Image: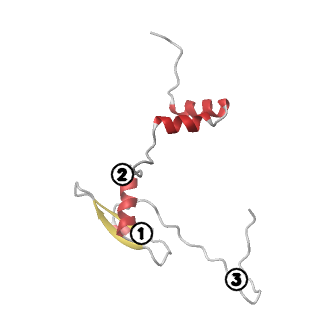
Amino acid sequence: MPEQENVSANGQPTEKKTKKKVTRSPFGSVEQANAGKPSNKYARLFRVAAPDGSVSFVWAGGTNEAVGVAAKAANWSAAQVGKDVSKEKVGNLLAQLSQEDRAILIAQYVPATTGKKK
């Protein structure tokens, strides 16, 4: 996709502004978080405390988002009830792939065997 030049209403080129992306992971200290401060004017710094007492710092738009970022970093996940992944759903999706694509995908999750049988 070609990069488009920013042009003002009067047709004059404008300076392209670069935004610092919001880091979607917790920081260990306020200093680290401030060093990674995003340019998004709506991002605020939140202190997120875990049940074990550990604390991290997250740039987010609100408390729910901050807790979500911290939970995701701790490998938590969520699924809507009734929309959970099941063997049946995965099987139906795998059946839609070509044999070659299915073999490649399955090989990524099945450990390689050495060919030796016990």
Number of residue marks: 3
Residue 34 screen position, x and y as percent: 40, 71
Task: Kindly indicate whether the residue at mark 2 contacts the one at mark 1 (C-beta within 8 angstroms).
Answer: no
Dot 3 falls on a residue whose secondary structure is loop
Drawn side of residue 71 relative to residue 16, left or right: left
- Label annotation for residue 74: 2
Drawn side of residue 29 relative to residue 17, left or right: left
Foreground pick, 110 / 77? 77
When asked about the image quadrant of residue 30, the answer is bottom left
Q: Taking 60 as reference, is 98 above or below it?
A: above
Please report whichever mark, 3 or 2, sits nearer to the chain's N-terminal start. Answer: 3
- The residue under the point 52% across, 18% down is 114
Foreground pick, 11 / 17? 11
Q: Kindly report the distance in space between the C-alpha atoms of the residues bearing marks 1 and 3.
A: 29 Å
Drawn side of residue 61 relative to residue 20, left or right: left
**What residue would you read off at disc 1?**
60
- Label annotation for residue 12: none
When asked about the image quadrant of residue 3, the answer is bottom right
Going by the numbered disc 3, the residue's amino acid type is: Thr
Dot 1 falls on a residue whose secondary structure is strand
**What residue would you read off at disc 3?**
14
- The residue under the point 60% across, 73% down is 18
Foreground pick, 33 / 75? 75
Going by the numbered disc 2, the residue's amino acid type is: Ala
